[in-house]
Image (tube, helix red, strand yellow):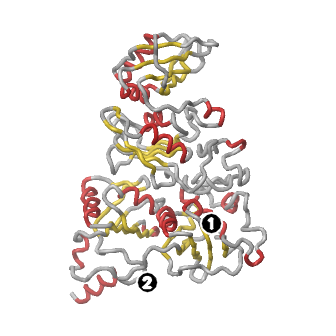
């Protein structure tokens, strides 16, 4: 047994040595959980998102080459909740089921650390694995900028390619580590391994491609600033990227794109640093931003809880949330029933949705909303099916039913909290009251109490108001009927029947 014990102690340095190593396939409960079978695209933030409902997460160690990770919960209860749930259910991480079991370790210890592990620091150590493209201060600054104020960056190549990034506070460093650890800067290469560094301050003697002090831009005669200010960054992958790559940083929609936009609704775009969202301030071609902007490091993802899963799907959530901003992506969470995440075009839209929809009641449930810590939603390659047979993930970028696609379109929207009165528009000019009532009756089993049709200046379409018995009925009607196609005799394409809430009382 001595040899076995020594082998186990070498294999797991954090094991306390009190268990028979032959029991490693049935380890005792521990605050530390071992994760296997991760997607190649999974990052630390995906893991936290997948398990945060089981308990508070203290630390995550990614092992991207092995497609494994360790998760340390704040207490053993969170770990037990996670492992017990996984025994009879799948926990999806970055769109792929992963396997969770107790670790032989009681806590996460990083290489070179003892029991007195380093506490979180405002300086991070980045190790870039498989660096197929040049790593400069511009690249490092670009990927860290959304999470806080970067003060200094130093790149060194003694042990491969590494960099230290100094933030102005610990919380920004924590946020950057959570969302970037395990990510690819470019698709399939330049994988990030991130740890807390030991220094308390970085020493920069000159501003150049491998070091920069952002608190002293003129240091060492760097007159022009880092290369490419105001121009698209990462041009090497744009023109010379690996065959078949999408040039996307972080393996998907959260990274850089060939036109210079990033996945966080910020940073200079192809039209220069003052025009991030396309000509005349319009949205980019990925559906992000909109005319309102997307400034700062705040994300644009809304957490949604309390959904009736017998009634709701991606399209129906879109029908409701499109009233408050451009909908980019929607993802239902398999690990928490009745929950979803919605990425909107900008943080203002998320705040607008929360202000108007939080705590409203429909389909027998109370909707609860909050701002997510996620900066964006990654694409889900293999979404699971919902109760109605539709998929749990949908990308709405470029969807014609988004209503904030440019300043002119946005100005037409009257932001209104849910009500029992709905304004309908873009209906066929010949539609009758009985046809409108029948459409709602077929969708929700309820008819409006009354309807008022407005006189039309043209005969191209019809508009008016319908009133339901309660606000809940109005919400359900909008969710189920909004964007219903209606054919018109002699028309080449159907009318898309559109709805929004109205504060106007319906008087007959």
Q: Is residue 471 above or below residue 287?
A: above
Residue drawn at (30%, 71%), measured in percent from left and top?
103
Which one is nearer the viewer's eye here, 129 or 14?
14
Q: Along the horizontal axis of the image, is 131 left or right of 369?
A: right
Task: Please say if the residues under marks 1 and 2 sit with CB atoms less than 8 Å apart.
Answer: no
| Quadrant assignment, res 285 | top right
Q: Residue 129, percent across and down?
A: 54, 72
What residue would you read off at disc 1?
141
The first of marks 1 and 2 along the sequence is: 2
What residue would you read off at disc 2?
112
Gap between marks 1 and 2, in whole Å?
A: 27 Å
Which one is nearer the viewer's eye here, 341 or 487?
341
Q: Is residue 181 above or below residue 384?
A: below
Which one is nearer the viewer's eye here, 157 or 431?
431
Residue furthest bottom in the image: 2
Secondary structure beneath label 1: helix
Residue drawn at (61%, 70%), measured in percent from left and top?
151
Secondary structure beneath label 2: loop
Q: Is residue 94 above or below residue 323?
A: below
Q: Residue 245, percent across and down?
A: 60, 57
Which one is nearer the viewer's eye here, 427 or 358?
358
């Amino acid at each position: 047994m001595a040899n076995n014990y020594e082998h186990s102690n070498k294999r797991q340095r954090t094991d306390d040595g009190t268990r028979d190593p032959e029991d490693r396939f049935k380890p005792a409960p521990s605050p530390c959980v071992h994760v296997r079978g991760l997607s190649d695209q999974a990052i630390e933030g995906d893991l936290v998102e997948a398990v945060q409902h089981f308990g508070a997460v203290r630390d995550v160690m990614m092992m991207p080459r092995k497609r494994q990770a360790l998760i340390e919960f704040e207490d053993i209860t969170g770990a037990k909740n996670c492992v017990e749930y996984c025994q009879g259910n799948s926990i999806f991480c970055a769109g792929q089921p992963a396997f969770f079991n107790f670790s032989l370790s009681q806590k996460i210890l990083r290489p070179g650390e003892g029991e007195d592990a380093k506490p979180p620091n405002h300086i991070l150590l980045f190790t870039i694995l498989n660096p197929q493209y040049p790593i400069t201060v511009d690249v490092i600054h670009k990927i860290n900028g959304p999470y806080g104020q970067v003060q200094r960056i130093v790149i060194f190549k003694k042990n491969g390619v590494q960099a230290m990034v100094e933030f102005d506070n610990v919380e920004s460093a924590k946020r950057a580590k959570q969302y970037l650890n395990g990510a690819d800067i470019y698709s399939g290469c330049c994988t990030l391994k991130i740890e807390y560094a030991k220094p308390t301050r970085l020493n920069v003697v000159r501003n150049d491609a491998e070091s920069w002090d952002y608190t002293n831009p003129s240091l060492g005669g760097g007159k022009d600033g880092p290369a490419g200010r105001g121009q698209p960054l990462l041009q090497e992958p744009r023109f010379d990227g690996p065959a078949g790559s999408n040039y996307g940083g972080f393996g998907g929609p959260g990274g850089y794109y060939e036109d210079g936009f990033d996945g966080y609704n910020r940073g200079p775009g192809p039209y220069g640093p003052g025009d991030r969202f396309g000509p005349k301030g319009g949205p980019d071609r990925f559906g992000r931003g909109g005319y309102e902007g997307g400034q700062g490091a705040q994300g644009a993802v809304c957490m949604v809880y309390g959904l009736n899963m017998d009634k709701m799907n991606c399209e129906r959530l879109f029908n409701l949330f499109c009233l408050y901003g451009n909908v980019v992506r929607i993802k239902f969470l398999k690990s928490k029933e009745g929950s979803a995440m919605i990425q909107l075009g900008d943080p203002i839209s998320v705040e607008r949705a929360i202000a108007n929809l939080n705590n409203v009641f429909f389909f027998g449930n109370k909707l609860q909303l909050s701002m997510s810590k996620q900066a964006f939603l990654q694409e889900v390659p293999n979404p699971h099916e919902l109760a109605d047979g539709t998929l749990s993930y949908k990308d709405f970028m470029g969807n014609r039913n988004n209503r904030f696609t440019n300043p002119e379109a946005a100005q037409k929207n009257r932001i209104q909290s849910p009500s029992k009165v709905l304004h309908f528009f873009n209906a066929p000019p010949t539609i009758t009251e009985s046809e409108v009532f029948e459409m709602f009756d077929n969708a929700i089993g309820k008819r409006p109490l009354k309807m008022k049709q407005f006189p039309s200046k043209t005969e191209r379409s019809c508009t008016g108001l319908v009133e339901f018995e309660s606000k809940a009925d109005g919400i359900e009607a909008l969710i189920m009927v909004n964007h219903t196609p209606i054919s018109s005799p002699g028309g080449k394409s159907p009318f898309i029947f559109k709805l929004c809430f109205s504060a106007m009382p319906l008087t007959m």
